[in-house]
Image (cartoon, helix red, strand yellow):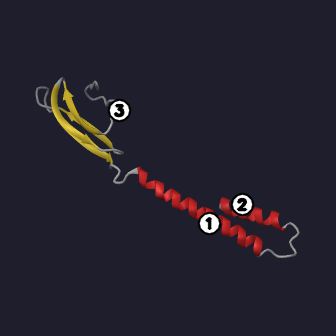
Amino acid sequence: NINLTAMIPSDYIKIPYGSHAILINGVYERVFSFKSGSIYTIVVTFENINDKPLIFVFGDVEPRPLSILWQIPQYILLTSGEVLFSVTGLDFAYSSVFIFFFYDRVLIRCVHLLQQLGY
């Protein structure tokens, strides 16, 4: 239920996706289908007070073409890649360290940590 007043915009309302009927003053006007992940603006105008209303629906944000669940395989691949990179990077760092480093393990760990943080 939305109370409309002339020349005053209504508040934003979250409507679940699916098909919804628009009733104006208890009279069935039209059925609209709203898709998941999209944002719509509905404009209701009257040319005269006795005329039927004109209803316009504008899609502000397009609906999602893919499901969010498609992100799960990407997370698995990224995580496994990070684990493989970290293990091989540490193995290489410890095997190729110079003899004359006194604090070699601390230095290598600091460099690896800075590399992981993006510096």
Residue 24 higher or lower than 81, as above or below: above
Q: Are marks 1 and 3 in contact (CB under 8 Å)?
A: no
* Amino acid at pointer 2: Leu
Query: Which residue is rendered at x = 25% and y = 27% of the image?
Result: 6
Q: Residues within 10 Å of mark 2 (few under 14, many from 20)?
A: few
> In the rendered image, is residue 44 in sight?
yes
**Which is more foreground, mark 3 or mark 2?**
2
Assign a secondary structure to mark 1. helix
Q: Amino acid at mark 3?
A: Ile
Earlier along the polypeptide chain: callout 1 or callout 3? Answer: 3
Residue 119 seen anywhere in this rendered image of the structure = no
Residue 99 x, y percent position in the rendering: 86, 76
Q: Mark 3 highlights which residue?
A: 13
Quadrant assignment, res 91:
bottom right
Left or right: 68 in relation to 20 = right
Q: Which residue is mark 1?
A: 84
The residue lying toward the viewer, choosing from 56 and 119, is 119
- The residue located at (29%, 46%) in the rendering is 59
Q: What percent of the width, then of the height, locates residue 110?
A: 76, 62
Which mark, residue 113? 2
Q: Position of residue 79 (x, y in %)?
A: 57, 59
Which residue is nearer to you in this view: 89 or 7? 89
Separation (CA) of disc 3 from disc 2:
47 Å
